[in-house]
Amino acid sequence: MATLAATAIIVSVENQQYHYDQGVYYIQSDGGYTVVQAPVGATVKEIPKESQEVQVNETTNNYYYGGAFYEKSEEGYTVVPATAGTIVPNLPEGGEEVRMGDVTYVKFGDTYYQPIQVDGKDMYEIVEVKEEDS
């Protein structure tokens, strides 16, 4: 992408600057900007209204949008690592299918999603997968 929308804001994480606009993160690259996975630790004031609340455990709910998980704080919403056991209703674009044994997972970034059925609906559970060394 050659240019960003005027609404894009700059978010800094560990000395790396990201541009954030409507749930999407970009880094500056040769001749423009490249979409990247949401950086853990990035905090933004607002997340897209299409974000969905997901239950992480009995006491914690996070927000999920575009493959990123956000935890609400006083400063806004902070990107947190995916937690195994969290169930999400959809997957971000760009995931790749990975088959291990009899199970096919969808991998997005470093996160593995296992397709499951919940009340007759297709959902995805985040699983911890140990890749076998070849």
Image (tube, rainbow, N blue to C red):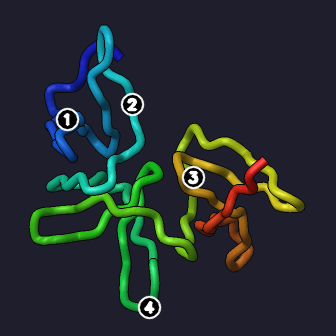
How far apart in space, not on screen, are marks 4 and 3 (Cα)?
A: 23 Å
Q: Assess whether mark 1 and mark 2 are in contact (beta carbons under 8 angstroms).
A: no
Crowdedness near tag 3: few (<14), some (14–19) or many (≥20) residues, C-alpha within 10 Å: some
Read off the residue under disc 3. 91
- Camera-nearest residue between 130 and 114: 130
Dot placed on the residue nearer the N-terminal end, 1 or 3: 1
Foreground disc of the pair 1, 4:
1
How far apart in space, not on screen, are marks 3 and 2 (Cα)?
A: 16 Å
Read off the residue under disc 4. 58
Foreground disc of the pair 1, 3:
1
How far apart in space, not on screen, are marks 1 and 3 (Cα)?
A: 26 Å
Give the residue type that dot 1 points to.
Answer: Gln
- Image coordinates for residue 6, horizontal then vertical, percent: 14, 26
Give the residue type that dot 4 points to.
Answer: Glu
How far apart in space, not on screen, are marks 2 and 4 (Cα)?
A: 33 Å
- Mark 1 lies on a secondary structure that is strand
Q: Assess whether mark 4 and mark 2 are in contact (beta carbons under 8 angstroms).
A: no
Give the residue type that dot 2 points to.
Answer: Val
Dot placed on the residue nearer the N-terminal end, 4 or 3: 4
How far apart in space, not on screen, are marks 2 and 1 (Cα)?
A: 13 Å
